[in-house]
Image (tube, rainbow, N blue to C red):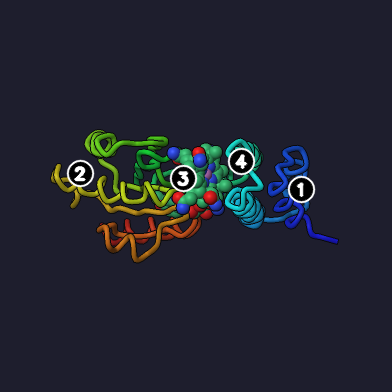
Amino acid sequence: MSSILDRIRDSVASLDVDSTLSYVRDALNGGFDVKSIIDALAMGMEIVGKRYEEGEYFVSDLIVAGEIFSEAMAILRPKIVESRRGTKPLGKVVIGTVYGDIHDIGKNLVATFLEAAGFEVIDLGVDVPPQKFVEAIKMHSPDIVGMSALLTSTMMHMKVVIEAIKREGLRDTVKVIIGGAPVTEKFAREIGADAYGENAYRAVEICRKLLEKRG
Ligand code: B1M
């Protein structure tokens, strides 16, 4: 018999919202940690993406998958935030999905985990133009700027944002971390970012390290 985590993955993959939410609740009540539940949800999203690529699913199915993930996160979020330690903010992060891109599930996950770890997070949302990142840096003086991109056609916009930050003379005031499915460590280096986060957990560890580097 398949485990509850397999069932979460498979119910996301088959776009079955009721079963997914019920399995997520069962897993939580059964003592599974939040990380393993999120990993199972993310694996389901991978399968949805593959089925879309293969022509089995359509954009409407991607939308449904996005809604399922968000509803599951609404169940998990209180559990994540409950684990928050201490009261003094660790540091401030401005985060957003770059312009041309409206994928926000991964970005929201990173923002939630950062908040749970004690960071103050200013979330600029999706389809964020370079100037909005620049204005947010001027307004909030963050320690870190985080960018997310899910499309190969929008990942280059991260470079445009970094250039805009440089042009305004603000590059030395912030560390830049980037992430998203098509992004790699190598790409981060090439465009002049300070770091690459392969997932939400790593992003938190890296943001902590970036703060240490700032001193
Ligand atoms: Co879109 N989509 N989509 N989509 N979508 C992908 C990305 C795709 C890979 C599917 C596929 O073909 N296999 C493909 C991109 C192909 C490419 O560019 N190479 C694709 C496409 C083509 C499109 C459209 C163009 C489809 C169309 O309209 N014809 C369109 C584009 C819209 C736009 O942005 N302009 C589109 C639209 C959508 C929806 C809006 C319907 C929906 C998103 C809903 C939403 O976000 N609210 C959607 C979805 C759901 C997907 C898939 C199926 C799932 C994405 C997801 O949420 N994954 C996706 C397939 C896939 O990724 N395999 C796909 C779960 C999430 C937890 O993972 O976002 O990767 P992820 O985040 C991870 C890490 O990447 C990392 O941590 C997260 C958690 O561990 N991370 C960071 C992310 N940001 C980070 C930032 C950091 C650090 C780490 O630091 C700041």
Q: Residue furthest front?
A: 55
Q: What kind of element bears circle 2?
A: helix
Label 2: which residue? 164
Tell whether label 1 touches label 4 (CB within 8 Å).
Answer: no
Mark 2 neighbour density, 10 Å: few (under 14) some (14–19) many (20 or more): some
N-terminal of the pair, mark 4 or mark 1, is 1
N-terminal of the pair, mark 3 or mark 2, is 3
Q: What kind of element bears circle 1?
A: helix
Relative side of 98 to 59, left or right: left
x and y, in percent, of residue 169 in the image: 13, 46
Mark 3 neighbour density, 10 Å: few (under 14) some (14–19) many (20 or more): many
Looking at the rendered structure, the kind of residue marked 1 is Asn
N-terminal of the pair, mark 1 or mark 3, is 1
Q: What kind of element bears circle 3?
A: helix
N-terminal of the pair, mark 2 or mark 4, is 4
For ligand 1, tell me if the residue under mark 3 lies within 8 Å.
yes
Give the mark toward the camera: 3 or 2: 2
For ligand 1, tell me if the residue under mark 4 lies within 8 Å.
no
Give the mark toward the camera: 4 or 1: 4
Mark 1 neighbour density, 10 Å: few (under 14) some (14–19) many (20 or more): few
Report the Cα–Cα distance between label 2 and label 1.
47 Å
Relative side of 79 to 149, left or right: right
Report the Cα–Cα distance between label 1 and label 3.
26 Å
Label 1: which residue? 29
Asked if residue 103 shows in the view, the reply is no
- Quadrant containing the N terminus in the rendered view: bottom right
Relative side of 187 to 160, left or right: right
x and y, in percent, of residue 180 in the image: 44, 52
Q: What kind of element bears circle 4?
A: loop
